[in-house]
Amino acid sequence: MASLPPIAIPGQRLGPLSTYSAGPGTHVQQSFIYASIAGPVVADPAQPKSQTRPTLRVSRVISSKDQAGLTSAVPVASSTTSKPRYNTLPAVDSIVLARVTRVQKRQATVSILVVLDESASQPQDQARTASDNDNVASILASAANPENHSSTDELRFQALIRKEDVRAVEKDRVVMDEMFRVGDIVRGSVISLGDQSFYYITTARNDLGVVMARMSRGRSPDRSENMQLFELGPSPCVAFGVLFE
Amino acid sequence: MADRRRINGPPGGTRPPVFASLQESSTGIANRAQRQRQPAELRKIFLKTGLIPTASGSSYLEFEPSVSLAAARSNPKSLIPPSSALKLACTVHGPKPLPRSAAFSPNLVLTTHVKYAPFAARKRKGHIRDASERDLGVHLETALRGAIIAERWPKSGLDITITIIEAEDDRWWGDAPDSHDASWGMMNVLAGCITAASAAIADAHIDCLDLVSGGVAALVSDDSNQSASSAPRLMLDIDPAEHRSILSACVVAYMPARDEITELWLKGDSSRAALEKDDGRTGHEALIDGAVDAARGANTVLAEAVRESIARSFA
């Protein structure tokens, strides 16, 4: 088996389809796997019990595992660390962070801020790089700032949370106004690519729901308000932060 | 309809008058630039990605100035540069959601804009895109559409914007317009646009079949021999300012790993090419092969620029 290149550029031949199966960031032509984006090549080992071949993929964002292989392969590396790019599209079952832009009686409109990398949500990949986490935090911080609200919504993918997708139990007693407020940051899972303009998102799972909210202006941040806000979440939240003015 | 919100220059553009006596004088200011390269030798290309931080992908491309231009820059004898060298910047925005009014699209919707800076050419360009700029945009879109794997990006759009900072001349500036005139400089510009856009797309991590690069070849009649018997010769990567008459030119967008052409633009009369005796190709076949060779050369630079961009972003 020929050794894999550490870094691939689009159009570079990576390996035959008889040894590997094609993963994300690659395409197949004439029973060979070619890279379709530039980045480090990762061969995910096959599951031991199944008969499948190892999966070749070209990584979009770097994980600590890829980093180790890359630093040895790339001798020269400038010290400027650029932001990891989240240009992955929302797909069915991907976890997204979104900001509520409009709350209606039957649905809430959100705009998707980040599509979380699926490899990052896997438990063995829990240790993400520091810059990765910083980046999500900075995106959320700027998104939660009311000054930035209307300006960039045109550039973001829009999604809907329908009333019946808010939580798994007592679906018919959901009141949207009590679940979401404009400006809340919601962690949701995509259930459908939807129509031409909206994706569909659900929060009906224990790890999904409002993860960040902001007190309304001019009210004193006392303990009871805090608890009140906590109950506003549609389901128990994994993380919860309240930003006071 | 005049644009009354801006203070506009004269509609026709301005050029300093050049007098015939000046060109004929032996002071050397009006020396025609001569091609110093071999017929198959390309100009050096500078290509760098990721220069525009707000875009999801970007690149900057520059062609090596010709010997006479480099000499004129270091030791100027005249205010008029003898030739020009291509400089352009490319930005890629997206994938981003389609506008609300757009219909559902299961594929990536590609939009290309090519714009000359007002100061890019010898004649001033307006702020509104003219026919040649729209034409370049369409050619660029065809070239890139064949390389992008559009079905991986449903419901999203990709905007590619190219600003040409310095364009190529269509002919030597001192020449009077004649019958062989055509927008030869545009073909070099298109080739540069294709290479730069490909680098910017790779920088934006959009799925592509291959890195697509542009190349130009032309049939040029020999400057030194003005007799009618001299047949035009094939040259790669021409600088139109260096040749007295260009008979035909061809630009291709080429993917070397797949040996596929995504865009082909042939202009002029290619029937009278002077090829080797045992060369069975027709003129336009030779022209296309030459352009593909030029594109292969540009691709080596492109691949290296993309590798650099990866090393930078994953450092």
Image (cartoon, coloured by chain):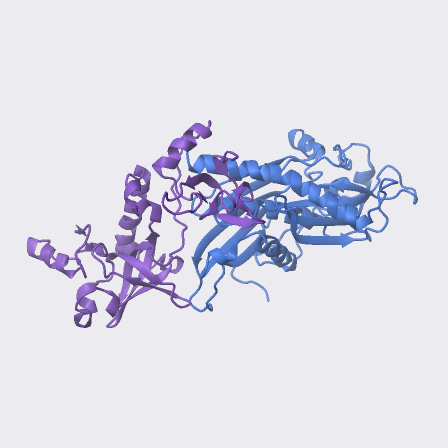
Chain colours: A purple, B blue
Which one is in front, A97 or A165? A165
A106 or B81, nearer to the observer: A106
B134 or B12, nearer to the observer: B134
Residue depicted at 28% across the width and 55% down the height? A147
Locate residue B17, reporting x and y percent. Answer: 73, 46
Q: Position of residue B246 (x, y in %)?
A: 79, 46
Q: Along the horizontal axis of the image, is B264 left or right of B228?
A: left
Q: Can you tell which quarter of the image residue B85 is in?
A: top right
- Counting from the top left corner in percent of width and height, residue B119 is at 60, 47
Q: How many marks?
A: 0
Q: Nearer the viewer, residue B299 or A79?
A: B299
Q: Is residue A46 left or right of residue A4?
A: left
- Tell me the residue at 82%/49% (across/down): B282
- The structure residue drawn at horizontal position 71% and vertical position 38%, both measured from the top left corner, is B82
Question: Can residue B174 be seen from the camera position used here?
Answer: yes
Drawn side of residue B256 relative to residue B182, left or right: left
Q: Is residue B7 visible?
A: no
| Residue A183 image point, x, y percent | 25, 58
Say above or below: A54 vs A143. above
Q: Quadrant of residue B20?
A: top right
